[in-house]
Image: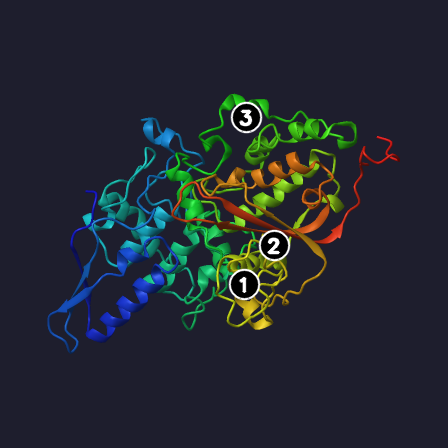
Amino acid sequence: MNGYPSTIKLGVTNMTKRSHFLSKSLALLLAGTAVDSAYSQTTRVSGAENGAVQTLNLTLPDKLAGDAIVDRKSKASAASAACEPVRPRAGTAICSLDIDGDGLQTRMDGLLIARYLLGFRGDTLSQGIASNACALNTTPAAIEAAITPLVTASPPVLDIDGDQNVRSMIDGSLLMRALRGQIGSAAISGVAPPILGATRTTWPQIRDYLNTTCNAGLSTLVQYTPNQSDWSTFAAKPVAGGNPAHDPDSVSWITPAQWDAAKWNGTVYNPSQMTRAEFASAVCPSVDRVRGIREVFYQHKPFADNQNPTKAEVDEWHRIAINHVRALVGYTSEDRQVKKDHCMFARAQWGDERKFTTQWDAEYPGTTGSAYGPCQGSSNAHCGSTFVPSAEDQRPYLPEGHPSCGTPGGAEGVFSGPKSNIPWSIKWSRAFCNTLIAEGFWGGHVGPWYHREKFGLSFWDSAPANNNSNAIVRAKWTGTSMPSLYCNPSDPQCQP
């Protein structure tokens, strides 16, 4: 039971409908997910045409592609026979999308629903999907029993777009994308508004319906990292390196005792009264442990699924983390809180694309190695820092209706210390801590972490095939640069 049957048969009324079913249902349903390749296989049709029922044979691979068959529990939990659900049983009396009954609503549940809507029944519904220790519905009959009421209810609960029908290529696609963590235009592109009569055609409407009706817990966060940013290796490499998830306790090389030694007791550190080494040691007991960051993570619980954080969740976590760094020196007032900025995230992405690829070079020539670029063959780490494409070329990177970005005053830091296989909860910290150790509180690259109003980050894998490659972090800063509340002891006028 660890693979698919070689052929799955579905009834389709004629060749035209068969083609529409294949091209739309499979392509749209699985767009943007890890399982695309499992359904992009060859097909063949047998039987009469002219309206007769056809037999559609989908030749599928032996195993599902990507991470979709990975057990949802951490290594430690999976090794234990005990069931330790990490959240209450999901759903409402009207609707639960927790199809396998493990207490979570995940992409696994979305995949089971997607198969059901495509006509999969019996063993083909559940084959190749691993159950975790908490799953209650592990047989095809139990899975079907969990899904069927969502389709047969009046009105059907799985009518995600509100057009009074449940369609695999529309509702199934919207649900799969939502449970995968896609939001905004990425969740509805090519799908909504799809059908005349649909009443839920925007992402907020679809998200709010699933949250209200099914207690889906979909994030209301706004994504700032552009969809064009490829984070696929940042999802896979930490797991390959022995880290079961992206939360601090899943970091394999940091022991509980080391985390305990990095707790924060609320002391506000005054860099004017400490040496550079003392201050750096107080804030960063090690380059992967900002003081108190573990407790901040579990206080905020920024990732709905620690194994699969979304871009929006990671963006928000970095805002929380930077503000915690500021809290360590007493910068807690509202005017001292860093804010996310769409243009800064987009410009960081454009800078990395300019630096590491040639995709903009033909349309935007310049001086090789300059701040504007092109950058191929240049050793200038800040090459691409001032590169901004035209308003038309910016549009796919920005939210709909967002003004185009310019080049206002600000700062940039490019950091090569973080590794691509470090979990997201601490991936950023080497960029900050290594720089703090090298420069101290008053360093030029450290200053924006404490004093700039707005930020944006881009993470770039320098060698995707190498599990220990660097994750290049490009940090862009703009807005007001707040004055330091401390003075540099090297200044004769400083009175700590």
Task: Give the answer, above or below, for where 282 lies relative to 375.
Answer: above
Q: Which residue is mark 3?
A: 259
- Residue 166 left/right relative to 384: left
- In which quadrant will I find the N terminus? top left
**Amino acid under label 3?**
Trp
Q: Which residue is mark 2?
A: 382
Task: Give the answer, above or below, for where 346 lies relative to 486.
Answer: below
For the point 66% across and 65% down, the residue is 406
Circle 1 sits in a helix, a strand or a loop, which is it? helix
Q: Nearer the viewer, residue 416 or 345?
A: 416
Foreground mark, 1 or 2, reads: 2
Circle 3 sits in a helix, a strand or a loop, which is it? helix
Circle 2 sits in a helix, a strand or a loop, which is it? loop
Q: Nearer the viewer, residue 21 or 103?
A: 21
Q: Which numbered dot is residue 397?
A: 1
Task: Give the answer, above or below, for where 448 lies relative to 183.
Answer: above
Name which quarter of the figure residue 325 lies in.
Answer: top right
Query: Can you give x and y, in whole percent of width and height, for residue 446 in the image?
Result: 68, 42
Label 2 packing within 10 angstroms: few (<14), some (14-19), many (20+): many
Label 1 packing within 10 angstroms: few (<14), some (14-19), many (20+): many
Task: Give the answer, above or below, for where 406 lies relative to 348.
Answer: below
- Residue 276 left/right relative to 120: right
For the point 58% across and 22% down, the residue is 261
